[in-house]
Every structure is written in C-alpha cells, then in structure tokens.
Image (tube, rainbow, N blue to C red):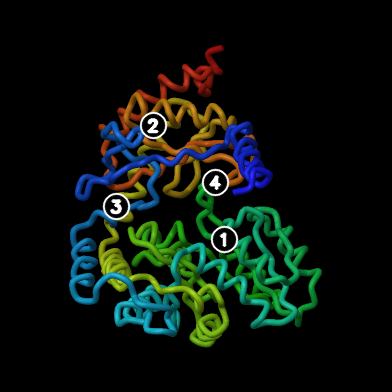
Amino acid sequence: MAKNYHSYFENAVARVRDEGRYRIFRDIRRSKGNFPKATWFRDGLDEKEITVWCSNDYLGMGQMECIVEAVKSAVDRAGTGSGGTRNISGTTRYHVQLEKELATLHKKDAALVLTSGYVANEATLGVMSKIMPGLVIFSDEKNHASMISGIQRARCEKKIFAHNDLADLEAKLKSVPLEQPKLIAFESVYSMDADIAPIEEICDLADKYNALTYIDEVHAVGMYGKQGGGVTEERGLTDRIDIIQGTLAKAYGMIGGYVAADSVIIDAIRSMASGFIFTTSIPPSTAAGALRSVKVLKMTPEKRTQLHERADSLKARLREAGYPFVDGPTHIVPLMVGDPVKCQAISDRLIEDFGIYAQPINYPTVPRGEERLRFTPGPLHTDAMMDELMVALEIVWEEFGLTTSKVAQAL
C-alpha cells in the first residue's frame, strides 16, 4: 500500500484509541454443555476459564444437545454450504420448513429468512421506497444501526421521532398527508436501554394516520410471549403489526435473520430486496438448527420464566448494593459507567483477575458519556456466579473511583 494512503488508516484507528473506544475482541472458545463457562485465550496463548456475562445467546440454546444434533444431522445429510443464492440452488428443504415455522410463530402468512438480522433490516427497509413511491419512514431515534442503514438505503423522506415519544411521533405523522405512504419503524426491546416500546399506542397512531408498522423483535423473539413470538405476542398485538423482523442469532442460538408478514408483502421483498437476492443463503445445517430451536422454545415456556427470574435476581442484587444500572422491564441489565476509558479498564480487570467477561459498550453503540457494561444473565447463570460477580464489582468499582448510591448517602 502506498505510504500516503497508509497514514489515513493509521490516523483513523489512532482517533478511536484517543477517544478511549478502541474495541478489543476477546478470543474465546465456548464449552458445549458448560455454558456460560468458556476458555479465554489471552494473547492467543495462555488459557483461562471465564464466565461469560455478555452473550446474546440468552437462553444457551447454542449449547443445547438437540440443537447441536440437528445441525450435525443436516451436515451428514446435505453437506455444509447451501450452494448459492436462494434463486440459484440455495433454497433447500430446511429453508422452506424454517420459513413456515417462523410464519406460524408470528401468525403471519409467510416469512423470509436472510443471512443475518442486520441484513434483514437493511434489505427490507431499504427496498420499501421502491415498493411504495413517495414513502415517508418514521424512525425511533434509538433504532438499531441496521435499521438506520436500511432507511438510508431507501433514499426516501425520513422523520426521526424522540425515543418512545408518542406525542412527537403523532406531530410528525400529522405533517404528512393522510393518503401518502407511511411506515413507522421501531423496536420492541431496546437492547442498550433495556426498555420496551409502547407498541399498542404506536399501532393506534398507525391506524389513525394510515401508516404501516415495522417492528424489530430481535431481542424479544424466543424470550417473550407464550410461544416465544416476542413482545407483540405477549401483549396480544401480533395482528396489529404489518412486518415483524427477528433474528435466529440470539435466543435461538444460531445465525440468520428474517421478516414475517402478509404473503404479498413477503413476495415483494423476496422479489426486490438486493440484500436477499444477491447473497448466498444460510447453510442448510444452520436452518435445521434454527428450525429445531424455534420448535423447542415454542414448547418450553419454562426457559423464558427462568431467564426473567435470573435477570430479576441480578437486578435485585445491584439495587440492594446501590449500583447505577438501568432498572428496566427486560432481561437486559446495563451497568452505567459513563467513561469510555474506565469502562474498558473495568472490563479488562474483571476478565483478567476475576474470570468475568463483560464487554464494554461505548460510542457509537451508545451516546458519549453513557458508556456501560451490559450484563445478560440467563437460565444457566447460578447464584454462585452472581455472588462472584458482586464481589468482583465491589472491588473494581472502588478501585476506579466510582460510587454507589449507598456510598454517596454515607458521604
């Protein structure tokens, strides 16, 4: 590479480092059947056993024996890759069965599986303006980067409304003629803030102002609702959402994303979204594992009960100790630090000296000054693990000059 170009890349990384938000990727190997335990390869050589507290495999389904066996069986029968795009040999029996299962899960006519949740959002939202000329998209200000990217790709008018602010959303909806195509894009569970959208009220506004509804349920599918259909199922609102987007990479322990909707909507997306048309489909074995996982979670509501009990247990401990965490209604537990350098240093100290892996969340994932450690307790995190975490937090919190509300009151 020419020297005059090389400096651009060096300077870009240097800026990220100077801001204290350089991302460190931990080299780990999960231990099947022993989750949330894993092995950390420090410097690629030294091995250390750790407890993972930040996995999005919320229920440990990626470790479940029947899911692993479904993947192995599909590999033995069909081989590894799918062989092409969905149009060119990449539609296998496993993909068709998975889409039928997902459509049934969300009580929709059809579903479409894409290569990731990110791609599902980007491809679907990105094609909406081609399907509906003159479209205006109304987007919650805290929507995921994949939704933002999709809306940008749509190249249509967009209006950003304040997070979960119904008055602001309605004011913006009022500014657009009733007959003009409109779509409201929002999430159910916001993974960084651990809150839930006012779904029913947003649907009411959509009805009032003639707008389609598009909800991202990636942090809710498998974990909320009687069968794991997400917050929309839990609240009896599935039929009021036009397009439900989800992932297979979190509660279901696999990889891939999808959208579920009316068959005409799915057919239009399938026919026009470049992010779906021009990429190789997920491997048959991945589809088989996801299919098994969706079926299992439909029939095991106790896993969801265990997940929320564990989250409530950790929140109770943090609350009792006075830590500044987001005490929301979801299974996600963000512990606020408010400084990127300290956030990374605390994460380093926890894993190096206590074997506790909690990844720092910095800008641009969250606003500057709102840096945090994001804990995701699951059914397999024991009381003993929580005891170890609380002991470690007490030590590092004091070490880095941070206070709890109890310490502040004492002073």
N-terminal of the two: label 1 or label 4? 1
Element marked by disc 4: loop
Q: Residue 60: which disc? A: 3
Other residues around mark 2 within 10 Å, as few (<14) / some (14–19) / many (≥20): some
N-terminal of the two: label 3 or label 1? 3
Element marked by disc 3: loop
Mark 3 vs mark 1, CA separation in Å: 24 Å
Seen at 31% across and 53% down, the residue is 59
Seen at 31% across and 67% down, the residue is 286
Circle 2 residue: 317
N-terminal of the two: label 3 or label 4? 3
N-terminal of the two: label 2 or label 1? 1
Seen at 49% across and 35% down, the residue is 335
Circle 4 residue: 193
N-terminal of the two: label 4 or label 2? 4
Circle 1 residue: 146
Q: Position of residue 373 (x, y in %)?
A: 48, 36
Element marked by disc 1: helix
Q: Position of residue 270 (x, y in %)?
A: 51, 82
